[in-house]
Amino acid sequence: VLTCYPLRTTGPETAAEGVNADKRRDTRGGSANKWCADQPVPWPNLYWLVDPVVSSRIGRLEHLGWVSHLQERVLSGDDPTLVDAFGAAHRDYAAARWALLSEEDRAYAEREGYAAILRDCGIAGFRQDTQVKCLHAHTAHALAGGANPIGRIALDALARGADEQAVGGVGGKPRPAAPAAPAAPAANPTAFAGWARPKSPTAAAGSSGPAA
């Protein structure tokens, strides 16, 4: 997990390759200031999940609908302990982000109108303390030591292999079963892994074998 400073300068000289010096629209999305500002701008993602394997696996959970599932759990109010802990996680995240700023930068944020997002908004800049939205953000918070119940649920799901139900792109198609390891040859040369080799076309019509 990478801890990010809450203010960043992304002028043309420091922006990633592909951003034009004349500040034309950047195709990565977001406001122009996000990528091309000459002055520091807010970066509310305090913790960034950088491990490619964990990030990919969390993405699979998202494709399987875990964001909606967990959002419904929070909003239903059926688990007050979860709701309270999640709200506290949002507040703790905001406090840690604001505390990371120097005194000079806190004054700058207040002067520029950035205090609301850096001091008052929750995890990754979410405006409501019931908002799930991004499992990567919550997982990064949990891995960084935060008491984030949504991040912990996501990590527990990975430990159970829940993400293995999905593979590939959005929507998550069922993962094909792994092929069984070939069995050792049986004493009878006509037998393989529990099924009999057909001896003739007639026998083949009534034999059973592994699925194609």
Image (tube, rainbow, N blue to C red):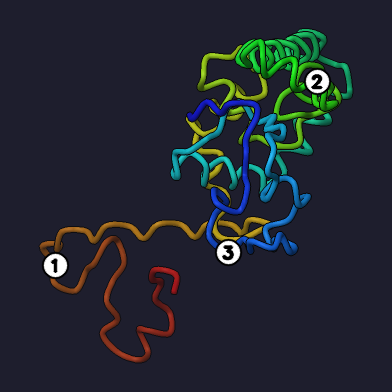
The Cα–Cα distance between marks 2 and 3, rounded to whole angstroms, is 30 Å
Image disc number at residue 115: 2
Query: Badge 1: few (under 14), some or many (20 or more) residues near its Cα, within 10 Å?
Result: few
Image side of residue 196 versus residue 56, left or right: left
Q: Residue at x 74, y 9 (%)?
A: 88
Q: Secondary structure at mark 3?
A: loop
Q: Is residue 186 above or below residue 152?
A: below
Which comes sooner in the sequence, label 1 or label 3? 3
Q: Secondary structure at mark 2?
A: helix
Residue 150 picture quarter: top right
Q: Residue at x 53, y 35 (%)?
A: 49
Residue 197 picture quarter: bottom left
* Residue position marked by numbered label 3 in the rendering: 18
Image disc number at residue 188: 1
Query: What percent of the width, then of the height, locates residue 195?
Result: 31, 67
Q: Residue at x 62, y 35 (%)?
A: 8
Q: Is residue 165 above or below residue 182?
A: above
Image side of residue 197 versus residue 69, left or right: left
- Residue ranking furthest to the right: 76
The Cα–Cα distance between marks 1 and 2, rounded to whole angstroms, is 78 Å
**Which of 203/50 is in front?**
50
